[in-house]
């Protein structure tokens, strides 16, 4: 991309300067173009710009505590093509609605990562408080997100080197959120974006945050290492036991055994030993087959999943063309901390397979209802955690919707999750 484009709409800012997207000397031109694109007046667009910037910053700050969504952002910036022609035209003052549409579409991708399922609630709030159309607000927001994606790729890319660098870069900007956001909207937007924990986070706390993440990585490596060592120990014990048995319990009439028979005895014993090992392997496989199930797709690919997983019933639903009604599946494989509403146990297989299955079935959407014994806010938080994990595994956020669980009966268990899968366009 040419150097003039790289300087468009953004300045290289020091860490102490206010977070922003639009370069001051191009501000008037950008405001005019966004005004034409959204249908809002130029004064209204100028009023909305710091609100848009605050929302972008809020979404970035949330990633300080969410490594999965950080990875999704990194992959998006690295792999998604930039609408460079549209940006050059906007710089030159020749941008048309269609070209802003390209920037807006790019921004929609970032919205799906940084503030998934938040934009509608924010748009309703802003339209009520600032007197603009919700649709106009969202169109302008997507343009600003697209322009910031350019800045992140061309100027702030060093912040994406790793999760720690990202956190260190943006935690210093957390005070800018309060400066950019109008006082009457600050608390409401922060509450919608669930920013309270991040805004209270001190830069010094990042040391412990990243240390905890690194410690988890080290634990995983140690676990793998310990498993290998355990295998070596088991093999050594088996061989040592066989040697000891042969030494202590072989027949005492050694003087009567011929040279030929001396060859027969260890071979026969070894065969018996191998038979016992074979039986042990078969028993192990039988136990394994009792707890695991192999799913076969029409293209021949196979997945091994737990027999009691909802993935078994979901596979049946997705591969059976006669099933046209939505299917509701209760998932007991997830477990949430009752205090923090965070996932308590590793369930990577579930998120990977769910994302893979739904990507194979383009016409299937999923609705998530996470059950909580506390309140709707807790239920929403759990459901959004699940959605973010699925998006992090590559599933489009457009295929996922979230609802609080308002049902309450003795059959529901705190931490249960209800997935409702729906096939679209089946009657067309």
Image (cartoon, grey):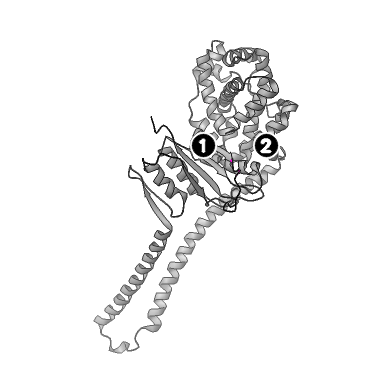
Q: Is residue 409 magenta?
A: yes
Q: Is residue 418 shown above or below 239?
A: above
* Residue 57, position as x, y percentages in the image: 65, 30
| 173 lies left or right of 328 | right
Q: Are marks 2 and 1 in contact (CB under 8 Å)?
A: no
Q: Residue furthest right?
A: 183
Horizontal placement of 274 versus 117: left or right? Answer: left
Mark toward the viewer: 2 or 1:
1
109 drawn magenta = no
Overall secondary structure of the magenta stretch?
Answer: loop
Which sits in the foreground, 400 or 1?
400
Q: Which residues are magenta?
A: 404-410
Residue 274, visible in the rendered structure = yes
User: Quadrant location of residue 424?
Assistant: top left
Residue sitting at 43 percent across and 58 percent down?
A: 291
x, y percent for residue 200: 72, 39
Q: Residues within 10 Å of mark 1 (few under 14, many from 20)?
A: many
In this figure, what is the number of numbered marks?
2
Residue 183 to residue 92: above or below: below
In the foreground, 129 or 233:
129
Q: Secondary structure at mark 1?
A: strand
Q: Is any part of residue 173 visible from this angle?
A: no
The Cα atoms of the two marked residues, 2 and 1, are separated by: 22 Å
For label 1, the residue is 400
Which residue is under mark 2? Answer: 195
Looking at the image, which is closer to me, 152 or 407?
407
Q: Is residue 54 left or right of residue 116?
A: right
Residue positioned 36% across, 72% down in the render? 276
Location of residue 402 with respect to 83 vertically, above or below: below
Check the image and name the residue furthest to the front: 409
């Amino acid at each position: 991309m040419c150097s003039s484009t790289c300087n468009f709409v953004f300045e290289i800012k020091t860490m102490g300067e206010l977070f922003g997207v639009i370069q001051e000397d191009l501000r008037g031109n950008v405001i005019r173009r966004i005004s034409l694109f959204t249908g809002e007046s130029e004064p209204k667009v100028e009023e909305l710009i710091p609100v848009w910037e605050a929302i972008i910053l809020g979404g970035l700050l949330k990633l300080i505590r969410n490594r999965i969504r950080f990875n999704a952002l990194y992959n998006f910036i690295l792999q998604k093509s930039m609408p460079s022609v549209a940006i050059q035209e906007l710089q030159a003052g020749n941008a048309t609605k269609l070209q802003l549409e390209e920037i807006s579409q790019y921004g929609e991708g970032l919205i799906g990562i940084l503030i998934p399922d938040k934009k509608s609630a924010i748009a309703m709030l802003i339209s009520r408080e600032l007197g603009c159309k919700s649709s106009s607000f969202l169109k302008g927001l997507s343009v600003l997100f697209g322009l910031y994606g350019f800045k992140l790729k061309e100027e702030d890319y060093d912040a994406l080197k790793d999760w720690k660098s990202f956190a260190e870069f943006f935690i210093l900007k957390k005070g800018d959120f309060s400066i950019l956001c109008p006082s009457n909207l600050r608390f409401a937007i922060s509450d919608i974006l669930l920013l309270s924990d991040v805004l209270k986070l001190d830069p010094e706390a990042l040391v412990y945050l990243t240390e905890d993440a690194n410690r988890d990585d080290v634990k995983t490596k140690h676990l793998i290492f310990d498993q290998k060592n355990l295998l070596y120990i088991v093999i050594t014990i088996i061989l040592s036991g066989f040697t000891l048995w042969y030494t202590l319990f072989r027949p005492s009439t050694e003087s009567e055994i011929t040279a030929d028979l001396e060859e027969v005895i260890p071979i026969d014993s070894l065969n018996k030993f191998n038979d016992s090992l074979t039986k042990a392997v078969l028993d192990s496989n039988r136990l394994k087959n009792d707890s695991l199930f192999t799913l076969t797709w029409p293209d021949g690919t196979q997945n091994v999943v737990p027999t009691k997983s909802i993935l078994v019933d979901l596979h049946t639903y997705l591969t059976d063309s006669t099933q046209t009604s939505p299917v509701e599946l209760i998932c007991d494989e997830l477990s949430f901390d009752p205090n923090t509403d965070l996932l308590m146990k590793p369930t990577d297989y579930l998120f990977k397979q769910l994302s893979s299955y739904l990507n194979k079935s383009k016409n299937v959407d999923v609705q998530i209802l996470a059950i909580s014994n506390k309140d709707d806010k807790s239920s929403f938080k759990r459901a959004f955690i699940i959605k973010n994990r699925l998006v992090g595994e590559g599933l489009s956020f457009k295929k996922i919707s979230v609802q609080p669980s308002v049902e309450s009966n003795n059959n529901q268990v705190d931490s249960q999750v209800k997935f409702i899968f729906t096939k679209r366009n089946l009657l067309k």
